[in-house]
């Protein structure tokens, strides 16, 4: 709980919701007849709607990307480090938009929402959604907000994949595309980790084939395991060593199984347990599938150069040296394909020991470069007050 | 099933068992009043018992390290690639011994064995055993076999840790110590993976706090997840890419959750399922703890140089470039500590894309170097027939 809102925060914010009654055709072949997107905005849209930024969230993210919902909030939005007054994504200059993706569990239509056809929660009947489906639904949100072209679409990890898909599918609707700690597709190892997470959830006897809401239970064990495993892949070996090394939770070995013996075990158990109370297992499954399926080049003869031939946005890609989930090599695949097409691309490989999570951490060099790039996105103050 | 036993195999072999009724004091403070070790031997012990090799097995290994139990065996022992006639560990020249470790589930006393005190399976009451405990029990087996000094103690992964512990605890009982793809202690990330595996098993409702034998069930889901996760860490990202990439199981995406969509998912599910039928969950838990606890330097002010000051064996260490479970850097920690003590050490870093599993794979350069080193271990044929 902040005693007072930090002056560089976007401050107290309120989510808004937008209903869409135009059916959305999905990649899976099914149609979503209607849906809601919950979203937040920070800053003011300027007169010609040229200062709008779309933030795309990652696996367990949501629309609450900066600021506080109330004074008793324990934490601000998930990217408070990058969004706010005077920060890289400067709310004094930009109109920042972020929505909870379709299939989410934080207010947009997803497995926990009521299916109007049945009057019951969608549960496992919610269709599998793809990165492209999300981008299409975000484009409708842009329409609703009167934004023809984003000044930038920005995302980290799975969010960066959405930014890339935007540049491919709607080349004239974004001026800049900022892709952080992402990859043009998952590797077999990435898919393997997702598969273990899914199996953990789906084999939990409380999963009930996804219909757990009706049984008044949640697949707590499975979701906890999925999150614990996820956390290992978000941190680097080095970050874990620096943070936990082999430090013992109670100063000595217990020669038993029930208590966490090493601090790292205690940390993971805590992360796993607390996640269960704030995230939906069916949504987790959907998000992992969206990751697995993302492979825009698959429609272009598996040729990333061809895939990116028609993008118009200027690109900024950033990666982190210790990220082994989506390593710098994965970012360079995209950079090289953009260069092969003579596109305008900036690339920054940031020295950081934090692993994949680095994209959420205010590493000074990262923040400085991010800020410099964002200054190039929109260098003028067109009718937007500049107050810190 | 081999139509005929390959000529360079040790051939048809039979496990033997040795009962020990002298109590064994364990690191955990408990005492094992009596126990059995099951083991196999290949080749002939020479007159002065100077050609004996001890092989130490890793997490899911056992005493059946080479050869076949019968003509209908689908596969030979787990290190058939390295042990046999004319192979690096040459059964024409060496007397090779390998036992199933205490706490195992393949015949040595472990959780599935009957506790003589209760008349029921030990189950979760089997004490937590450490690498040192194993080495002590192996030393008694050496006594029983009339082997005062091993020509070499050899192991990969957790087996390499046992070899290292042998050199520390019984410096005059081995001439050579061969440590492959190992580390002087686990990193926080290594422990973290083990913890997820343990939680998968222990939160499985069929685990029954380890007393599942009495309920006629096994924690199938948890053990499957543990194995799937293990497999990811045994392979490299690159090995998975080479083997599976993003190949689809049925040639297309299903937009569903039940069927394995990518080949890598299908592979992992198969590995997980088949493991459940051949391994005990309580043993799996014990093995992961032995790994977590291994840290010989913890008794020497966390100083590996001090820890290795009194070893007498000549060392050979080998690591594999793509092994991210126990990377080459972890082997170099041991090499450097040995060099700091002016010990005799050979070190080989083998270019291999296979990941941690490389130590089981007959990579030509690896096998050649291994063979050359083993030739130096025992260059003469002292009364042992040399037949291939």
Image (cartoon, coloured by chain):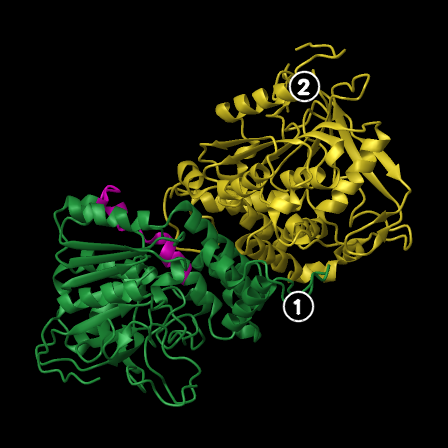
Chain colours: A yellow, B green
Q: Is residue A367 left or right of residue A250?
A: right
Say what secondary structure mark 2 lies in: loop
Q: In which quarter of the image is residue A338?
A: top right
Residue B69 at x, y = what percent? 36, 85
Q: Which residue is drawn at 77% across and 52% down?
A: A27
In the image, the segment drawn in magenta is B287-304
> Which chain letter matches label 1?
B
Q: Residues under labels 2 and 1: Cα distance?
A: 47 Å
Q: Mark 2 points at which residue?
A: A378
Residue B40 at x, y = what percent? 28, 79
Q: Name the residue under label 1.
A: B250
Q: Is residue B369 left or right of residue A257?
A: left
- Please check the rendered image and state whether residue A276 is part of the magenta-colored stretch, yes or no: no
- Please check the rendered image and state whether residue B293 is part of the magenta-colored stretch, yes or no: yes
Q: Which residue is drawn at 64% across and 57% down?
A: A201
Q: In this view, does B223 lie above or below A292?
A: below
Q: In this view, does A310 lie above or below B171?
A: above
């Amino acid at each position: 709980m902040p005693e007072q809102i930090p002056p560089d925060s976007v401050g107290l914010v309120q989510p808004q919701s937008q209903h869409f009654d135009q059916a959305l055709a999905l990649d899976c072949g099914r149609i979503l007849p209607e849906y809601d997107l919950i979203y937040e905005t920070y800053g003011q849209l300027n007169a010609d709607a040229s200062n709008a930024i779309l933030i795309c969230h990652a696996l367990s993210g949501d629309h609450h990307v900066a600021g506080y919902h109330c004074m008793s909030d324990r934490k601000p939005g998930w990217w408070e480090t990058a969004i706010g007054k005077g920060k890289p994504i400067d709310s004094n200059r930009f109109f920042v938009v972020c929505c909870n993706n379709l299939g989410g569990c934080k207010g947009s239509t997803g497995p926990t929402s009521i299916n109007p056809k049945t009057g019951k929660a969608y549960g496992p009947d919610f269709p599998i959604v793809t990165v492209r489906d999300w981008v299409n639904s975000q484009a409708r949100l842009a329409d609703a907000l009167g934004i023809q072209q984003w000044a930038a679409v920005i995302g980290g990890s799975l969010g960066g994949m959405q930014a890339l898909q935007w540049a491919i599918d709607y080349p004239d609707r974004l001026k800049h595309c900022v892709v952080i700690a992402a990859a043009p597709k998952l590797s077999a190892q990435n898919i393997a980790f997702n598969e273990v997470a899914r199996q953990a959830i789906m084999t939990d006897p409380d999963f009930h084939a996804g219909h757990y809401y009706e049984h008044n239970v949640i697949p707590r064990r499975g979701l906890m395991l999925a999150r614990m495993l996820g956390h290992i892949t978000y941190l680097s070996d080095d970050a874990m060593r620096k943070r936990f090394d082999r430090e013992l939770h109670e100063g000595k070995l217990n020669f038993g199984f029930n208590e966490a013996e090493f601090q790292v075990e205690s940390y993971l158990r805590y992360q796993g347990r607390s996640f269960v109370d704030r995230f939906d297992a069916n949504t987790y499954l959907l998000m992992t599938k969206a990751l697995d399926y993302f492979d825009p080049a698959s429609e272009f003869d598996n040729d990333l150069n061809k895939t990116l031939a028609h993008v118009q946005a200027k690109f900024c890609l950033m990666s982190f040296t210790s990220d082994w989930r989506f390593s710098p090599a994965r970012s360079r695949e995209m950079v090289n394909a953009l260069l092969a097409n003579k596109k305008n691309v900036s690339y920054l490989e940031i020295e950081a020991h934090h692993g994949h999570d680095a994209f959420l951490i205010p590493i000074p060099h990262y923040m400085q470069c991010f800020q410099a790039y964002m200054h190039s996105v929109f260098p003028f103050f067109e009718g937007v007050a500049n107050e810190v």
